[in-house]
């Protein structure tokens, strides 16, 4: 397999994707590298795994194939060979050589054509899957870029060239996938966290009985929220302990934050709740200024190994 190559001058049939404009942040992502937290390595992977899976299904890839994750749109790519692609996640205006095309549908890019993604209508992260997958060398079993640890491919830059693999799966029998638009106020299910007893009874009631606003401090590591302060029932220090995707940690200022794909593997602030894995894609698409409400649920199912 070939690595990401900076600049041009290489055979386009070997590196058929050229990054014309990388936008604010575009990275290579698959479903991550689970099972390595004991070695200090986080899972990483697509922040909205549901959308990456859908994009891959639309082009006939395995669900764990590597694609591109674009933050707040702005991505432009040029094909140097015929490609089948799909755009999912945060819906954006899609144009191929200036002509409007649809999200959540298989699209054909001919050699020399350019695909451009606009700014999302809602949400934050948009996914571009290419039939065959982005064929960069895996690091510890995954092609994902972890922006916190620096593991995996470098974030993409203008002029980069990317290789594409060969798909042996049949094309899907659909030409469009219906995707529901989330409500203006996101509802995210949580269960009590391992340190819920470090908070006053009023704190959990406030967490699940109030709306929070997504702050401007939101990235692939986590989403900081603004709203009612969650008061502790004890003020001693908590030794660092393991963190999971969706952990709702409460720092000293009492304002919760939701950890996402590139979260640290350990943390020293108490975790009051954990987001249901089926609602993590909603949290990953929450944009600054949006309102979010937590709803208490009783159980979280054990995720399969590929979740």
Image: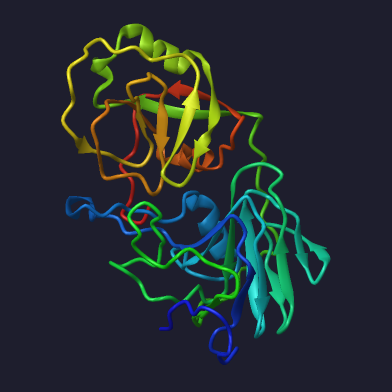
Q: Position of residue 221 (x, y in %)?
A: 41, 44
Q: Can residue 95 be seen at all in this image of the molecule?
A: yes
- Quadrant of residue 17 within the rendered picture: bottom right
Q: Is residue 228 above or below residue 93?
A: above
Lateral position of residue 96 relative to residue 254, left or right: right
Identify which residue is drawn at 47% across, 23% down.
294
Identify which residue is drawn at 73% across, 83% down.
112
Q: Position of residue 210 (x, y in %)?
A: 51, 15
- Quadrant of residue 230 within the rendered picture: top left
Lateral position of residue 28 relative to residue 118, left or right: left
Q: Is residue 291 above or below residue 221?
A: above
Task: State the residue in front, 240 or 55.
Answer: 240
Q: Which residue is situated farthest in the right direction here?
A: 99
Task: State the residue in front, 259 or 186.
Answer: 259
Q: Position of residue 35 (x, y in %)?
A: 24, 55
Q: Is residue 151 above or below residue 137?
A: above
Identify which residue is drawn at 47% across, 14% down.
228
Number of marks present in the image shown: 0
- Quadrant of residue 241 within the rendered picture: top left
Task: State the residue in front, 44 or 238.
Answer: 238
Q: How is the image coloured?
A: rainbow
Q: Position of residue 277 (x, y in %)?
A: 41, 40
Q: Can residue 173 be seen at all in this image of the molecule?
A: no
Q: Is residue 176 above or below residue 287?
A: below
Which corner quadrant holds the N terminus?
Answer: bottom left
């Amino acid at each position: 397999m070939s690595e990401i190559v900076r600049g041009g001058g290489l055979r386009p049939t070997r590196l058929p994707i050229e990054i014309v404009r990388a936008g604010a942040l575009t990275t290579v992502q698959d479903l991550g590298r689970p099972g390595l937290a004991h070695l200090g390595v986080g899972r990483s992977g697509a922040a909205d795994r549901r959308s990456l899976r859908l994009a891959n299904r639309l082009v006939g890839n395995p669900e764990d194939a590597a694609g591109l994750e674009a933050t707040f749109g702005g991505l432009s790519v040029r094909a140097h060979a015929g490609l089948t692609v799909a755009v999912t996640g945060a819906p954006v205006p899609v144009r191929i050589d200036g002509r409007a095309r649809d999200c959540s549908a298989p699209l054909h890019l001919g050699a020399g054509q350019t695909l451009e993604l606009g700014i999302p209508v809602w949400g934050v992260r948009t996914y571009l899957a290419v039939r065959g997958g982005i064929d960069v060398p895996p690091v510890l079993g995954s092609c994902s870029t972890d922006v916190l640890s620096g593991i995996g491919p470098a974030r993409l830059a203008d002029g980069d060239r990317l290789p594409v693999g060969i798909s042996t799966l049949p094309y899907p029998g659909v030409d469009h996938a219906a995707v529901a638009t989330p409500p203006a106020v996101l509802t995210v299910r949580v269960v009590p966290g391992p340190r819920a007893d470090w908070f006053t009874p009023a704190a959990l009631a406030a967490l699940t009985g109030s709306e929070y606003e997504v702050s401007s401090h939101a990235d692939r590591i986590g989403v900081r929220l603004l709203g009612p302060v969650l008061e502790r029932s004890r003020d001693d220090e908590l030794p660092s302990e393991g963190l999971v995707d969706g952990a709702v940690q409460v720092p000293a200022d009492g304002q919760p934050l939701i950890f996402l794909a590139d979260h640290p593997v350990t943390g020293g602030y108490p975790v009051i709740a954990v987001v249901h894995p089926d609602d993590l894609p909603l949290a990953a698409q929450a944009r600054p200024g949006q309102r979010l409400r937590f709803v208490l649920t009783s159980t979280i199912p054990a995720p399969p190994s590929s979740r």
